[in-house]
Amino acid sequence: MNILQLSYRLPYPLKDGGAIGIFNLTKAYYQLGHQVTLLTFNTYKHFIEPTKIGSELTSICTLITVKHNTNLSPTKALISLIKNESYNINRFNNTEFTAQLTDLLQRNKYDLIHVDGLFMAPYIDVVKKYSAAKIVIRAHNVEHFIWQKLAMNASFLKKIYLKILASQMKREEIIFWKKADYVAAINSSELDFMAQQIGSDKVKLLAAGIFIEHQIENNITRKPLSIAYIGSLEWMPNKEAVDWFLNHVWQKIIDKIPNATFYLAGRNTPQQYFNLKIKGLIVVGEVEDAKLFLADKQLMIVPLVSGGGVRIKIIEAMAQSTAIIATDMAADGLHCINKKNIIIANDAQTMANEIVAALGDEDVLSNLRLNAQAHAQQHFNQKQLLASFLSNIKFTSADANNTLT
């Protein structure tokens, strides 16, 4: 098939879950034998010179980038609020992107338009004007769920604003889901919600996955009493999770294990974390290789208290045989079994107790690692997941139907 993929961000470098998730689907399309054109924003915030984009991306697709400023503007946010429009979505309006998209659609015949995330959904109207291709929105998460959960933990005035954002986003999400031919849900709970809104025939499961052959066995000696966290700290739910862990959990661990060490890593780590003077905390900041960062740590924690979708970093960590303690929120959609391939802890005292117990029992950690790796290998092969998803789409072109695998 000939596929056009629209992305709100350049999936490079592969240093955070968002970039990895988009890249993995591009690669899976390529490995299944499809031709992919990736039209993507190269935002000011994460700008990469086109000449510095690695061959791991450029070799699997025809890449077209559009430079765009998505930085927050209080004035534009206020205008959107007054107009009762979603500013989060409006930030991605761009005339050059529209022109590039129009040109591609007029010059090429596509079988499938893959829309990565809600923020690209407004371009569906352009697609429908120039193409008869099937349109799939890949819902990386249900966006308004995130803002609803953030509002629950916010101060009074911020709570009001976040509730308005959530309401606006919910309205927009449902409108765009209805416009697409299919919506690809990332986990079963979000699939059920989407199906209630637009009907089950239009919603299909396309779980986040990885390329198993690239996950190496971890034979590095682990640092004693070491705990790790890694995640993009520009994403509000990740920052909220780290703050919750540091404020409510970490001291409980230090009280029981004074020599424990917490290694904090993440893209765009705010300066405030480097300024902290907390016993046992080592702020690493951005790392070149997440796998190497995790390889010598005894335990990884994922203490999300809000958010949505599926944590690709957890899947990658499981595949490389990492012991993980996480909240139910973080493990949603991973079909893990508590105490077998992951440990679930949802409140501060439980998480502290589970971490202390795990660090004191190497047999528990060893079993978690082995079972986690087996679970990732069995359930999260991205190529197989995408092939299964495509087999459930009703294409009008006989040629498209014949090239799904």
Image: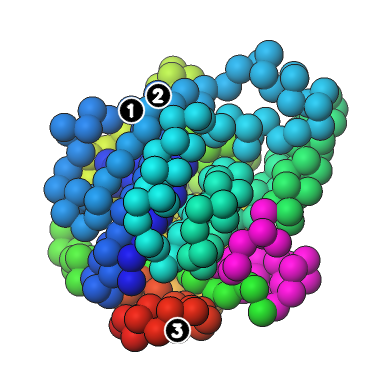
What residue is pinned by disc 1? Answer: 47
On-image quarter of the C terminus:
bottom left
Looking at the rendered structure, the kind of residue marked 2 is Tyr
Q: What element carries label 1?
A: loop
Image side of residue 36 versus residue 130, left or right: left
Tell me if mark 2 has few (under 14), some (14-19) or many (20+) residues whose alpha carbon lies within 10 angstroms of its own.
Answer: few
Point 25% across, 55% down: residue: 61
Q: How many labels does the image show?
A: 3
Dot 1: few (<14), some (14–19), or many (≥20) neighbours within 10 Å?
some
- Marks 1 and 2 sit apart, C-alpha to C-alpha, by 5 Å
Residue 223 visible? The answer is no
Q: In the displayed structure, would residue 72 be above or below residue 168?
A: above
Distance, label 2 to label 3, CA atoms, is 37 Å
For disc 2, the marked residue is: 44
Left or right, residue 42 beside residue 33? right
* Image quadrant assignment for residue 283: top left
Pointer 3 residue: 391
Residue 185 part of the magenta-drawn span: yes
Find the magenta span and give its range: 176-200
**Between 155 and 164, which is closer to the camera in this rendering?**
164
Q: In this view, does 260 lie above or below 369?
A: above
Which of disc 3 and disc 2 is earlier in sequence?
A: 2
Residue 353 x %, y %? 56, 57
Q: Residue sitting at 67 percent across and 54 percent down?
A: 176
Identify the amino acid type marked 1: Phe
Residue 325 — which label? none
